Amino acid sequence: MTESPLLQQYGARESMEYDVVIVGGGPAGLSAAIRLKQLAQEKGVEIGVCVLEKGSEVGAHILSGAVMDPRGLNELIPDWKEKGAPLDVEVSEDRFLFLTKDSAKQVPNWLLPDNFKNHGNYVISLANVTRWLGQQAETLGVEIFPGFPAAEVLYNEDGSVRGVVTGNMGVGKDGQPTENFQLGMELHAKYTLFCEGARGHLGRQLTDRFKLRKDADPQVYGLGIKELWEIDPIKHKPGLVIHTAGWPLENDTYGGSFLYHMDNNQVVVGFVVGLGYSNPYLSPFEEFQRYKTHPSIRAFLDG
């Protein structure tokens, strides 16, 4: 292990014990932490729950533009409205457009699959919702450590997961310790929950070690780009949700776009390209720029 010389030089790592350690302070990790604390309260017991978040603050790495179905939140925190959850803009209209270079054809809403029907859902900033979930978790006694990425998985002698190690601090650009160097801390737990997202580095290690993808279909990935625009108030329609398929992508390339009208004259505009495309010259960023010139999209962004 590359850390062995460091351990010899700086001594053993400090450690902390918890009942549950959760890696990742996103919606999944925080919701799990909240539910664990709720269940413990219902049974009248105390459990120690810790959340590690690599970002400088909870929500710092949450970049998605999002339409949220509140059903899960209704079950987790039924009084979320009274507690000030930032779900303020209810979806007012759904549009799904098939684009050609110069025109757009809207699909009748009754033909849309259920996942494109957003009646009762909310246009949100997922980063703000995540920050709010962090506040609810801390109120329940969850310990959240922002700015501490999990760097390594710890194992018991029988091969089961023992916990994780946080990254070393005070490492220079050359990878060598500086005068401010501190060893990472070991967090031991009865249960370790990994909520790193779609492609976390610890998740990849666990997948290889425990053969988690054996006999599974290949995972499909896409590249998403998002921008936040402040537009002309005359063109702003709070709660309008637009999805598109087609141009500027070729028929054999998976992808599409979203344009969500939030509050404060803001829209979230984004473009997604599946990473299975075969054209080596395709640039998702350049396709995104072309997409914004389409008459049906440009109409909102001009000015």
Image (spheres, rainbow, N blue to C red):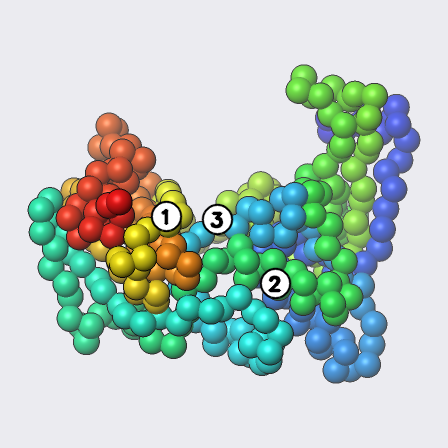
Q: Nearer the viewer, residue 297 or 38?
A: 297
| Quarter of the figure that contains the N terminus | top right
Left or right of 66, for residue 137? right
Which residue matches tag 2? 132
Where residue 293 appears, as percent x and y from the top left, is 20, 42
Residue type, mark 3 in image: Leu
Q: Disc 3 designates what residue?
A: 63
Q: For the residues labelled 3 and 1, say whether their Cβ atoms are less than 8 Å apart.
A: no
Q: CA distance from mark 3 to mark 2?
A: 15 Å
Drawn side of residue 160 relative to residue 79, left or right: right
Question: Of the residues under marks 3 and 2, which one precedes in the sequence?
Answer: 3
Image position of 39 with respect to 27: above or below: below
- Which quadrant of the figure has residue 142? bottom right
Q: Which residue is mark 1?
A: 229
User: Which label's residue is closer to the chain start, 1 or 2?
Assistant: 2
The residue at the point 27 percent across, 33 percent down is 286
